[in-house]
Image: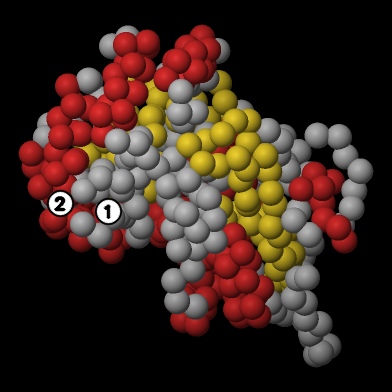
């Protein structure tokens, strides 16, 4: 249930206030198994936030993790609990137009919980954009690009199937860069898998590889050498996120670009990694950074340090992916594109109109707010507590 208040005074404030904040767990099926080093996903759980304001504007946000607690230390259930128990009581009744003030208020009382903070900031910016008649990217300084290149992750675990999938996507002009998930098998098997896909797609197709922290340093030395020889363009987080010294040694040793993902969350991480020369590229994610503005701050540090920026994903649905798109559209540089393909991995969705992908890019909405509207019937159908919100629907 959302938390609500009813002002007792007879002179209501001149500014719109936050009246209720509701966080809903939504379970959506995926189009296929999605295999990572730490888990195999058959569904994705979203935390959808609806923020209702006194002027009738409703802002929406999303926080999404990968595989519950398999990927990180925040789960959909903990995100919802943090919002319901700690965040919402801080904000209800407060000025809905002062986004920075609201986030400062949260930061003063809530440690960590970057995913919950990101979802709340997204909803506040969505509401403010609607209120002002501006897209969210305009609130972030304005877009420098109207569409974002998006790669696709080949993660079925079967090389032949992955090749067929990639070829079909190239022919459909949906994706032309592909990432491979490895690290869950012995090194020789993983390398053979990458080599098989490279042979199947040819040398003209750009391949990147995500190890998801699965290797120790000696294994990474052997693995990166083999991947470099196979023509892989980018290798993501080969070692544990806290092992920055190993990441630095690997970056110094090899020519292939190494990307920090789990190792970089916010601007402080970006600064520390840059000071150590530990990575060539940063994968930035709005939930890990704690919001849209914090992501831009991390991007500014990367720019200052000469580190490439990559628009990362936690396999968010349409709301979270479009929120991230507004951020990355506003980044002055985006050398490595994005992987905002999360909505395409879902068999069904909870929005009225799904994001538009064409000519290998995600198109940026140009309407007020995020540019995404919830389908309330679908939301009622897929919400985890739907036994009390039953709606007949055909997926």
- Quadrant where the image shows the N terminus: bottom right
Q: Residue at x 58, y 65 (%)?
A: 79
Residue 207 visible in rendering: no
Placement of 296 over or under 257, stated as above or below: below
Q: Residue furthest bottom?
A: 9
Label for residue 246?
A: 2
**Front-most of residues 267 and 262:** 262
From the viewer's perspective, tell me whether residue 270 is left or right of residue 217: right
Q: Residue at x 74, y 76 (%)?
A: 3
Q: Residue at x 81, y 89 (%)?
A: 8
Image location of residue 161, percent across then percent down: 49, 18
Label for residue 240?
A: 1
From the viewer's perspective, tell me whether residue 27 is left or right of residue 217: right
Circles 1 and 2: CB distance less than 8 Å?
A: yes
Image location of residue 275, percent across then percent down: 14, 57
Mark 1: secondary structure = loop
Marks 1 and 2, Cα distance to the nearest angstrom?
9 Å
Q: How many marks?
A: 2
> How are the colours assigned in the image?
secondary structure
- For marks 1 and 2, the one nearer the N-term is 1
- Quadrant where the image shows the C terminus: top right
Image location of residue 235, percent across then percent down: 27, 35
Image location of residue 181, percent across then percent down: 39, 34
Placement of 345 over or under 201, stated as above or below: below
Count residues near mark 1 (Cα–Cα under 10 Å), then give few for <14, some for 14-19, many for 20+. some
Residue 160 visible in rendering: yes
Mark 2: secondary structure = helix
Label for residue 317?
A: none
Q: Residue at x 47, y 54 (%)?
A: 70
């Amino acid at each position: 249930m959302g938390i609500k208040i009813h002002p007792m005074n007879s002179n209501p404030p001149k500014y719109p206030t936050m009246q209720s904040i509701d966080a809903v767990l939504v379970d959506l099926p995926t189009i296929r198994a999605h295999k990572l080093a730490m888990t195999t996903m058959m569904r994705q759980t979203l935390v959808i936030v609806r923020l209702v304001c006194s002027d009738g504007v409703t802002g929406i946000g999303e926080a999404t993790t990968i595989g519950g607690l398999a990927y990180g230390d925040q789960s959909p259930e903990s995100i919802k609990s943090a919002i319901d128990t700690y965040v919402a009581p801080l904000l209800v009744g407060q000025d809905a137009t002062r986004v920075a003030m609201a986030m400062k208020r949260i930061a003063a009382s809530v440690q960590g919980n970057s995913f919950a903070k990101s979802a709340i900031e997204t909803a506040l910016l969505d509401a403010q954009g609607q209120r002002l008649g501006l897209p969210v990217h305009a609130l972030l300084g304005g877009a420098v690009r109207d569409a974002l290149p998006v790669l696709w992750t080949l993660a079925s675990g079967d090389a032949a199937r992955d090749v067929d999938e990639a070829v079909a996507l190239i022919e459909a002009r949906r994706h032309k860069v592909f990432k491979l998930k490895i690290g869950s098998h012995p090194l020789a098997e993983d390398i053979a898998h990458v080599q098989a896909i490279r042979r199947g797609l040819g040398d003209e197709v750009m391949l990147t590889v995500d190890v998801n922290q699965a290797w120790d340093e000696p294994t990474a030395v052997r693995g990166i050498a083999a991947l470099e020889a196979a023509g892989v363009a980018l290798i993501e987080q080969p070692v544990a996120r806290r092992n920055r010294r190993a990441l630095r040694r690997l970056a110094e040793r090899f020519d292939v670009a190494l990307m920090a993902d789990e190792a970089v969350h916010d601007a402080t991480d970006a600064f520390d990694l840059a000071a150590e020369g530990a990575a060539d590229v940063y994968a930035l994610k709005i939930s890990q950074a704690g919001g849209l503005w914090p992501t831009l701050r991390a991007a500014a540090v990367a720019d200052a340090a000469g580190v490439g920026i990559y628009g990362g994903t936690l396999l968010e649905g349409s709301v979270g992916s479009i929120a991230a798109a507004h951020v990355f559209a506003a980044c002055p540089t985006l050398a490595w594109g994005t992987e905002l393909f999360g909505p395409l991995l879902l068999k069904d969705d909870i929005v009225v109109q799904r994001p538009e992908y064409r000519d290998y890019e995600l198109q940026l909405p140009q309407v007020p707010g995020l540019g995404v509207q919830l389908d309330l019937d679908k939301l009622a159908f897929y919400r985890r507590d739907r036994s009390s919100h039953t709606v007949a629907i055909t997926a």
